[in-house]
Image: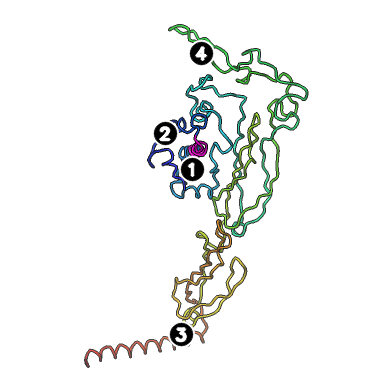
Amino acid sequence: MSDYYEILGVSRNATKDEIKSAFRKMARKWHPDVNKSPEAESKFKELGKAYEVLMDDEKRSTYDRFGEDGLANAGFNTQGPFAGGFGDLDEIFNSFFGGFGFGGNSGRRDPNAPKRGDDLRLDIELEFEEAVFGLNKEITIDHLETCKSCNGTGAKEGAKPVTCKTCGGSGRIQQTTRTVLGHFTQIVTCPHCHGKGSVISDPCPDCHGEGRNTVEKKIEVKIPAGVDNGSKMRLSHEGDAGTNGGVAGDLYIVIHVNPSIYYKRDGINVFTKLDITPAQAVLGDTVTIKTLDGDRNISIPAGIQHGEVVKVKGAGVPDLSKPSLRGDHVVVIGIKTPTHISNEEKMLYQKLYEIQAGRKAKESVKERLKGVFK
């Protein structure tokens, strides 16, 4: 199992600035364009995964508690930012830190480069039993898809982007500002083409030149047995479409489980309460209870005490990581004293009381005699 802190060479209480600094150093060492060793690519991908997790407070907290498997179980993408490949160092540093000027672009990110689409989140509600046993559920989302009319170019059929006249196709312009200290000149992104170097003179009428449309989509989702309140699922590439040929983002489904009025869940076990009479507690009994699998007979052992439990093995919730393994149904016994009894019942209780009182009296005499006849 990889240790993300060890990969970056930082302590477990490292600050974000320390993590950034460590990543910059290690990235320069292991980038495949610089390091030609066979292990460079895998090392660099590990660096990306470690950096992505440790720079995100929620991911880092989950990783510190449960490790890499915990991230996957919580629904986080654990493939890392370089799973689909990586660009040069300048491009990577621009993406992560805003640029360091390692190449001729001086930290400028290419606006025409493929860009991944945004991730989306959808919250859904499930009933208690649906979460226990899982189900196939149809969901509806609104997300951005690549425009079919223009294939994402943003231009009307037959039309092509033309070179921006403002910047001459460079995507940048020189801007001079006059101040009391003199004239300052800087290179800025072209405000007309937004750095692309070209503009669409005849935009696509369906997407209005954006290259993407908002589309309603229905998706059949398999909810696994054993999900709990707050569980997350990730559907790859069901988020917004990317631009310039970039991959689509992911869809994260957050599950909210409505509580049951009968069951109380604790992990993969469920708890219910069963009130019995004093006679049942003394003599024992066989009673029928409701379980997740339907009605079931359970045996109450003679002499059971208030607050003790009877377990129905394997009648609980399936383990999310191993559905064939189920928890227990734990029945908490309560002994309920009757408040309204018949005359016959009252006579029987009176007789029982006298018997028990007499027995206690005899036992008390025996204890006193033991003190005399030692």
Residue at image mark 1: 59
**Amino acid residing under circle 4:** Gln
Residue at image mark 4: 186
Q: Report, in whole angstroms, how far the alpha carbon at label 4 lies from the one at label 2.
A: 31 Å
Q: Quadrant of residue 111?
A: top right
The residue drawn where x is 61% and y is 71% is: 295
Image disc number at residue 22:
2
**Amino acid residing under circle 2:** Ala
Residue at image mark 3: 349
Above or below, comparing residue 49 to residue 272 in the picture: above
Q: Quadrant of residue 154?
A: top right
In the image, the segment drawn in magenta is: 37-47
Instruction: Single out the residue that lies furthest toward the bottom.
Output: 373
Compare marks 2 and 1 and give the one earlier in the sequence. Answer: 2
Asked which secondary structure carries label 3, the reply is helix
Compare marks 4 and 3 and give the one earlier in the sequence. Answer: 4
The residue drawn where x is 44% and y is 73% is: 306
Q: Report, in whole angstroms, how far the alpha carbon at label 4 lies from the one at label 1.
A: 39 Å
Quarter placement of the C terminus: bottom left
**Amino acid residing under circle 1:** Lys
Above or below, comparing residue 50 to residue 233 in the picture: above
